[in-house]
Each structure stands twice: as C-alpha cells, then as structure tokens.
Amino acid sequence: YTNDEKGAKVGVLFYGSEGYMVIDSYSHYQTYLGKDEEMGPGRDEGGDHFGNFIAAVRAHDPSILHAECEEGHLSAALAHIGLASAKLGRSLEFDPEREKFVNDAEANQFITRVYRKPFVVPGGAASDDGRMSNSYASSGSNRWSTSG
C-alpha cells in the first residue's frame, strides 16, 4: 500500500529532491514536481503485462512483448526472494545458478509449489537435478543476499 498520494492506493512511490513519482500499475506512472506538485513527465499505455503476453502468443510474435520473458522472470524472482526473507524474518543467501536458497530447506519452500496436473512444468520447477527451469546466472552475480 502507498501513502495515497494522488489517489494511488497500491504501487510504488519514489521521492526525490524535486518531487515524487507514483507508479500504480505496470503501464502507468506520473511525476509531480515542486511544492505545488505540478504534473511532470508520465506514461499511460493502458493494458497490462498479462494481456500483452496473451496477445503475443495469439499473434505468434514475441517482438510485441513489453519485455523479454526472462526479464519478467528475473524481476518477479527478485521480489519473491525479498518476500521469502520478510516472511521468514531473517537474512537469506540465494544461489542464482541453482535458483535455490543456500542450505535452507525452509526458504526453498517459497521457490515453487506443487503443480496440479496437467498444468505442470516439465523438467522445470521440480526437476530431478534440483535446478529451476530458468537461470539467474545472467544477473552477473554469483549470489544474492537479502536481509529480512
């Protein structure tokens, strides 16, 4: 939840030396500048990432995606890693190559779930080698550490 600036009840607020930015959805942001909070640059493209993904699948055209699928995976994973740390109330160490928390079975329960057949991830989330279906290795970091 936000502080309700400009009616944004959910989202992210960034405060800067010259104003603030309200990001209340995947496709909209607005800046407010100065003490009078005059509207600055913003964007409102409408739609959402889910609808965009379905449109790209239907069109057989990945070039219309808002972002590469792996970028979405990495962005969501970063938030999920932080959420696991917050829920457990402690720091965690994450191995991006294996996509698992290091020596932490309790934290690794947050990595995936049991999928309902026939909606399974073949060779992915529950693969025999302990790896997830996508790799964080492209992040350029060997390990991420979070604080709860």
Image (cartoon, rainbow, N blue to C red):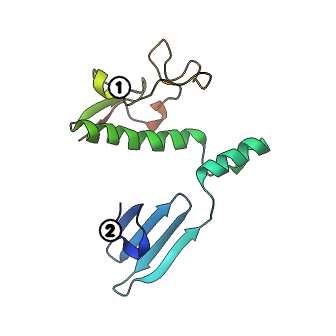
Q: Can you name the residue that lies furthest to the left here?
A: 90
In-image side of 98 versus 58 (left or right): left
- Mark 2 neighbour density, 10 Å: few (under 14) some (14–19) many (20 or more): few
Residue 146 quadrant: top left
Three-letter amino acid code of the residue under disc 2: Asn
**Image quarter in which the C terminus is found:** top left
Counting from the top left corner in percent of width and height, residue 109 is at: 36, 26
In-image side of 60 versus 103 (left or right): right
- For the point 72% across and 48% down, the residue is 55
Q: Can you name the residue that lies furthest to the top here?
A: 128
Counting from the top left corner in percent of width and height, residue 80 is at: 39, 40
Mark 1 and mark 2: Cα distance apart in space: 33 Å
Query: Residue 18 or 111: which is nearer the viewer?
Result: 111
Residue 110 quadrant: top left
**Where residue 3 is drawn, which disc sits there?**
2
Q: Can you name the residue that lies furthest to the right here?
A: 59
Counting from the top left corner in percent of width and height, residue 28 is at: 54, 65
Counting from the top left corner in percent of width and height, residue 34 is at: 36, 83
Residue 102 quadrant: top left
Q: What residue would you read off at disc 1?
A: 108
- For the point 44% across and 16% down, the residue is 130
- For the point 47% across and 81% down, the residue is 39
Query: Residue 139 or 5: which is nearer the viewer?
Result: 5
Query: Residue 9 or 134: which is nearer the viewer?
Result: 9
